């Protein structure tokens, strides 16, 4: 009977699986803590702000924004509501579809995102990229993309 049939993992697979589990549980907290200390926004808030920064006219339909950030529609709605309280974004009705909403980045939000970018990049390097041999960046990026996109 093969390992695939019995569900057993090779030692290398087991080590990878356990390391991935630790990273999945620890990394978000470390990144959020570092980002909030440095910029005042969470990693999730930054992801939403960055997506809006890159969007045409700094506006996106909420469902598209959720997909772009890997969030559920309800989660992205709560994040945009929080950003609106801070004057960084607003939520509007979609001009062609009254059932849909659009998130719009404010000028203050654009400024805040640009200010936060240097800290975001420093955190990415310190907490992840500098810990990995650059020769592995592309392969690891491909592997993580496969995991994120799923079967």
Image (spheres, rainbow, N blue to C red):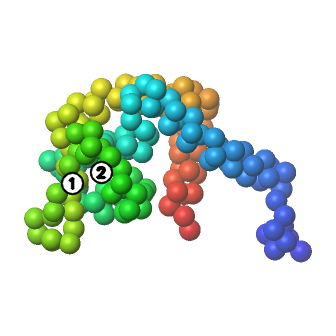
Q: Mark 1 points at which residue?
A: 91
- Against 77, is 124 above or below? above
Q: Is mark 2 on a helix, strand or loop?
A: helix
Q: Where residue 140 sits in the image (x, y, percent)?
A: 58, 44
Q: Name the residue under label 2.
A: 81
Q: From the image, which quarter does the N terminus lie in?
A: bottom right
- Against 56, is 113 above or below? above
Residue 73 quadrant: bottom left
Residue at x-position 51% and y-position 53%: 145
Q: Where residue 106 sits in the image (x, y, percent)?
A: 18, 41
Residue 19 quadrant: top right
Q: Where residue 38 sits in the image (x, y, percent)?
A: 43, 25
- Against 95, is 65 above or below? above
Is the Cβ of the residue at disc 1 closer than 8 Å to that at disc 2? Answer: yes
Q: Is residue 90 visible?
A: yes
Left/right placement of residue 149 relative to residue 62 reads: right
Q: Where residue 63 sits in the image (x, y, percent)?
A: 31, 63
Q: Nearer the viewer, residue 71 or 130?
A: 71
Residue at x-position 56% and y-position 68%: 151
In the picture as drawn, the residue positioned furthest to the right comes out as 1
Residue at x-position 10% and y-position 65%: 95
């Amino acid at each position: 009977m093969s390992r695939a049939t019995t569900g057993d993992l090779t030692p290398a697979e087991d080590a990878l699986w356990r390391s991935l589990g630790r990273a999945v549980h620890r990394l978000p907290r470390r990144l959020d803590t570092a980002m909030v200390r440095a910029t005042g926004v969470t990693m999730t808030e930054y992801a939403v702000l960055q997506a809006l920064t890159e969007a045409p006219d700094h506006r996106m339909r909420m469902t598209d924004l959720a997909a772009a950030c890997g969030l559920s529609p309800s989660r992205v709605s709560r994040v945009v509501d929080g950003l609106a309280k801070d004057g960084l974004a607003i939520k509007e009705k979609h001009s062609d579809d009254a059932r849909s909403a659009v998130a719009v980045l404010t000028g203050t939000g654009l400024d805040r995102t640009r200010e936060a970018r240097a800290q975001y990049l420093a955190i990415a390097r310190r907490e992840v990229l500098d810990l990995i041999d650059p020769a592995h960046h592309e392969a690891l990026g491909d592997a993580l993309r496969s995991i994120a996109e799923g079967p």
